[in-house]
Amino acid sequence: MPESRRRKAAVEKKRAQREVEIAKGREPESSPRWWAPLMVGLMLLGLIIVVTAYVTSGNWPIPFGNGNYNLFVGFGVMLVGFLMTLGWK
């Protein structure tokens, strides 16, 4: 199946950019080694907080007066993990 000109141009542009990076003697930028484990860890921690809050009717893992705060904390931690995926290279 023939490729569109736009896709072919994008691939060639990326290839040229990579060649320039290699010619400068440095590797193309990538995320630090700790980025992916922290990202996945935050998503899993948020999931554990949310599941624990549902199972214990909001009394655990953080004892708030209102049980819904645990859900907010859990979803907030997961959201930070998912937002980290935007910066992962």
Image (tube, rainbow, N blue to C red):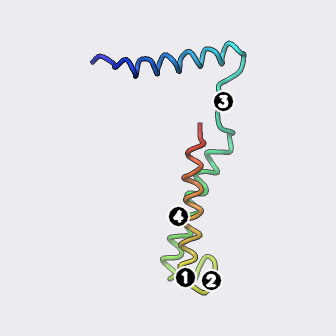
Q: Give the residue pinned by disc 1.
A: 67
Residue at image position (61%, 55%) is: 41
Which tag is nearer the camera, tag 4 or tag 2?
2
Query: In terms of sequence position, does the residue under pointer 3 or pointer 2 come before the other?
Result: 3
Q: Give the residue pinned by disc 3.
A: 29
Q: Left or right of 26: which side holds 10?
A: left
- Secondary structure at numbered mark 2: loop
As shown in the figure, which amino acid type bears the numbered disc 3?
Glu
58 to 6, vertically: above or below: below
How crowded pointer 3 is (Cα within 10 Å; few <14, some 14-19, many 20+) is rated as: few
Q: How far apart are marks 1 and 3 (CA)?
A: 43 Å
Residue at image position (34%, 20%) is: 4
Q: Give the residue pinned by disc 2.
A: 64
- Give the x, y percent position of residue 45: 59, 62
How crowded pointer 2 is (Cα within 10 Å; few <14, some 14-19, many 20+) is rated as: few
Q: How far apart are marks 4 and 2 (CA)?
A: 18 Å
Residue at image position (71%, 21%) is: 26
